[in-house]
Amino acid sequence: MSTIASTPGLLRVLVSSVAARLPLPMLGIGLLVHAEHLTGSFAAAGVVAAAYAVATGIGGPLLGRLVDRRGQTAVLLAGAVASAALLGAIALLPAGTALGPLVALASGVGITAPPVGACARALLPGLVEDAETARMAYALDATAVELTFVFGPPLALGLGAATSTGTALAAAGAILLAGTAVFAAEPASRRWRPDETQRPRGGSLTAPGIRTLVLALVAVGVVFGAAEVGVAAAAETLHGTALAGPLLALWGVGSLVGGVLATRLGGGTDSAAGLTFVLAALAAGHLALAAAAGSLAALALTLLAAGTAIAPAYASVYAMVERLAPAGTVTEAFAWLSTAAAIGTAVGAAGAGPLAEAMGPVAAFVLAGGAGAVATIMTALRTSTLAPRPVVVVPVPA
């Protein structure tokens, strides 16, 4: 931590990027609540929220690839302006608006959302002196991002309750625009230039190691989606759904604790064996939720413990990207990881819902633990793809 604290440029990048990312967790719940207010239907609102999520998953890698070709500044600012304008347009829609325009506008927000997280992570190696400090920076980033998920949704709901759901969306757009502008104004972001090396035609996914990380994060996303459903179902069974929020907050606190510990211990690992170990801990912790589902106290403590593996798992994955991604595709690779986790979360929630309804929360937690096991086994079987690329030494003629 002392090395990171002594690097002002790094701290400014992390702080400004987290501020720019704060609105993103606000948008999912904000669009859902606003769409329900306009249409009077939670089913229609769910379609709008899903359209936004899918569009974000598509837009992230596309904008990441564009950053890898054109640099960060113009892409980030254009995306932020477009997203903020579209959110303002949604905020102004009258009650009774048809579903089609809502879906189109929400999809536009997702497609144009600036990939600040991917851009920030692409900058980190250039702001530190060695690989160990880079791992610490990735761990700190993964930890700090948890704050956006802790504060973002309550902020959106609080603004919506105090003013209106449209005002909450407009405010999220304003924060997104201002935060992205501050990040894009950072000297490190403005100086960053794409690698001019010949890029592979298929982008970052041509690298086997990046494909391994993407597949692993899809499975990790399933863990999160299934666990969220399981927590909601368990809370309803035990003492009412109102307890789901505090329980999920404890889960996030566990991730914060794990991230802080990983940062203090040097940022975790960037080896295949280390990642496999962290994923095994993630799987075991979330499978243990099945045994704790019948007791509120046991569930709370187990969620806190299970969460401690989340930030270290992300930090380990992020630390591998720079050496695994083909030249000129690093930002796109980071964006693909975000997309993978989002897809997995959606799949996990969709799969756990029917399981929890038919068999209770234990089934959802078993799905979460099983998905973690899949991530662990797959990473272990594909260890060779995560090995550092060999350095080719060209002999100098005598």
Image (cartoon, rainbow, N blue to C red):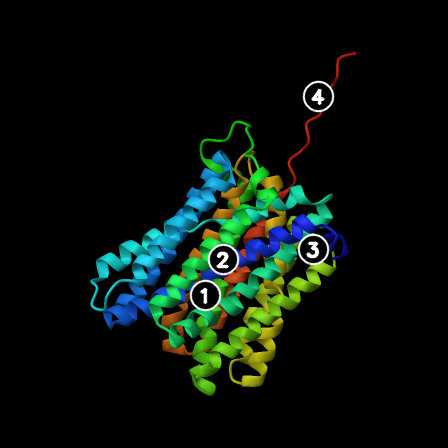
State whether residue 361 is above or below residue 309: below
Three-letter amino acid code at disc 2? Ala
Which of marks 1 and 2 precedes in the sequence? 2
Which residue: 45% across, 35% down?
202
Viewer-side label of 2, 1 = 1
Viewer-side label of 4, 2 = 4
State whether residue 342 is above or below residue 331: below
Give percent across and percent down for residue 47: 29, 62
> Viewer-proximal residue, 137 or 83?
83
Which of marks 2 and 3 precedes in the sequence? 2
> Viewer-proximal residue, 17 or 142?
17
**Residue placed under numbered mark 1 in the picture:** 225
In the visual, does 376 lie left or right of 85?
Answer: right
Give percent across and percent down for residue 51: 32, 57
State whether residue 327 is above or below residue 139: above
Which of marks 3 and 4 precedes in the sequence? 3
Which residue: 47% across, 86% down?
238
Whole-angstrom CA distance, mark 2 to mark 1, is 10 Å
**Badge 3 element:** loop
Three-letter amino acid code at disc 4? Val
**Residue 267 — which label?**
3
**Badge 1 element:** helix
Circles 1 and 4, Cβ within 8 Å, touching? The answer is: no
**Badge 4 element:** loop
Can residue 43 be seen here? The reply is yes
Viewer-side label of 3, 2 = 3
**Badge 2 element:** helix
Three-letter amino acid code at disc 1? Gly
Which of marks 3 and 1 precedes in the sequence? 1
**Residue placed under numbered mark 4 in the picture:** 394
Whole-angstrom CA distance, mark 4 to mark 2, is 40 Å
**Residue placed under numbered mark 2 in the picture:** 219
